[in-house]
Amino acid sequence: MQLVVFKNNKSDKDFKKWIKHTTGFAPKNITLYKQAFSHSSVISKKDATSSPSNERLEFLGDAIIGAIIAEHLFNIYPFKDEGFLTQLRSKIVNGQHLKELALKFGFNTFLKASLSHNEKTKSSAYGDAFEAFIGAVYVDIGYEKTKKFVLTKIIQTHVDISELAETNEDYKSQLQIYCQKNKYILEYKLLSEDRQGANKIYIIQTIINDKPYVTFENYSKRVAEQKAAQLTLQELQKEVG
């Protein structure tokens, strides 16, 4: 298996310059940002304590960006209900969207990971690094400056919220509504959860009234469920003509 290894060959000076250009703020603790770009695939167990991967920062960054986006949507959509706000936030912070943003910002230049070509293209490494970077920014310069960075450098520049609000890509919700309307019993069955390299692959099957419909696999359980729901809706539409 051919491995694609990303190594941060940039100097600290270049790295700090890139961080300031990206966030609008000079970094205080460069070590945090280096950790944000350290994927678990390049961290050995014996080095995990002294040189941790970006997983903890990813956990924190996920919560921080979620809170910032939630507050922003709450303010700009004062009359929309919780369901609308939740779905719109999910569209903004879903893994694929974060991956696209990470590549726009040039995260692939700094990410340290040891992944096969297939794993590189399908894994959540870029999206995870994006969340970890947000976590690093928060720890380094605080919530208010992180909020300013997210809203001005990410949302206002790279996210068309109005367009996202008009598109309905929550196929699970659509399928759920369809089944409720027709009094069908819907189930998402996890057929398998296997580890492949540094990632897990999930195989999801939709079952309606005990009848198997569509099976779909992906490195993201959420994506697998959404795609299975989308394909199931297409099958149901064929059935009714």
Image (cartoon, rainbow, N blue to C red):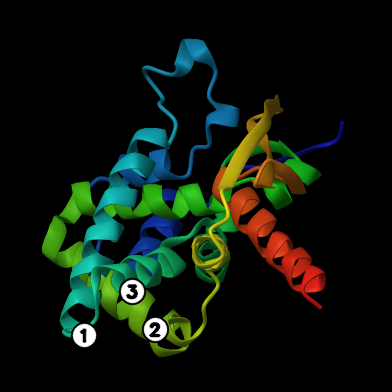
* Residue bearing mark 2: 161
Tell which circle, 1 or 2, labels the residue nearer the N-terminal end.
1
Q: Position of residue 215 (x, y in %)?
A: 76, 46
3D distance between C-alphas at marks 3 and 1: 12 Å
Q: Please state if 210 lies on the left or on the right of 175 as rendered.
A: right
Residue 76: which disc? 1
First in sequence: mark 3 vs mark 1:
1
Front residue of 104/215: it is: 215
Q: What residue is disc 3 on?
A: 84
Horizontal side of 10 relative to 201 (left or right) equals: left
Residue 119, quarter of the rendered image: top right
Residue 133 image point, x, y percent: 37, 52
Mark 1 near mark 2, Cβ–Cβ under 8 Å? yes
Q: Amino acid at mark 1?
A: Ile
- Residue 235 lies, in percent from the top left, at 78, 64
Residue 15 location in percent, x, y? Answer: 43, 56
Residue 125 lies left or right of residue 131; in this view the side is right
Q: Disc 3 to disc 2, how far (Cα)?
A: 12 Å
Secondary structure of the residue carrying numbered label 2? helix
Q: Are marks 3 and 1 in contact (CB under 8 Å)?
A: no
Neighbor class of circle 3 (other Cα within 10 Å; few <14, some 14-19, many 20+) is few
Q: Secondary structure at mark 1?
A: helix
